[in-house]
Image: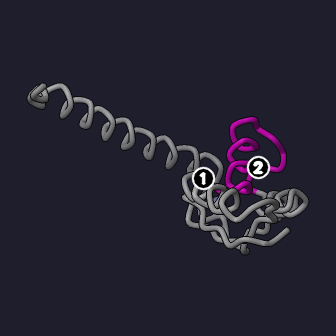
Amino acid sequence: MAWEVVSWACGHNGHIQMYGPLSGRTARQAQEAEQKCFACWLLRQWASGNDPRAGNVDAARAIAEGNGIHISPFALAASGAAALRAEAAELRARAAELERRAAEIETAPAPAV
Ligand SMILES: [Zn+2]
């Protein structure tokens, strides 16, 4: 068992308790790097579900801690609604990027066989 350093896509950093061989821990670190931290995920769930804990960063971090995920302290800059709108903007930007790549594939010359 080891505490491995993790940097998540949301910009937060911390450590996760990991078990097993190094290759599995490295794969988990890469997987975590592509997603939001557990606290951000929880905060989004709470905000979208009108949970009274919406915006409660400390509660989210404490639950993460109980699941073997230590997230360095952070301040929640945006309110619940603003955070959801920021995420919607991110998703629109991601959708536009995927459309652009799909169009590139469609307009690329067919590979020589
Ligand atoms: Zn986060």
Left or right: where does residue 88 sit relative to residue 33? left
Label located before the other in sequence (1 or 2) = 1
Disc 2 under 8 Å from ligand 1? The reply is no
Q: Ligand 1 is in which quadrant of the figure?
A: bottom right
Q: Residue at x 66, y 64 (%)?
A: 76
Mark 1–mark 2 distance (CA, rounded to whole Å) = 26 Å
In this picture, is 111 found above or below 7? Answer: above
**Spot occupied by residue 54 in the image (x, y as percentages of width and height):** 76, 49
The quarter of the image holding the C terminus is top left
The residue tagged 1 is: 31
Label of residue 92 in the image:
none
Quadrant, the N terminus:
bottom right
In the rendered view, would you say 36 is above or below 84?
below
Q: Residue tagged by mark 2? A: 54
| Occupied quadrant, residue 103 | top left
Range of magenta residues: 37-55
Q: Residue at x 79, y 58 (%)?
A: 56
- State the image quarter where residue 12 is shown: bottom right
Instruction: Give the amino acid at mark 2.
Output: Ala
Left or right of 57? Residue 75 is: left
Judge from the rendering whether residue 113 lies leftward or rightward of residue 57; answer left or right.
left
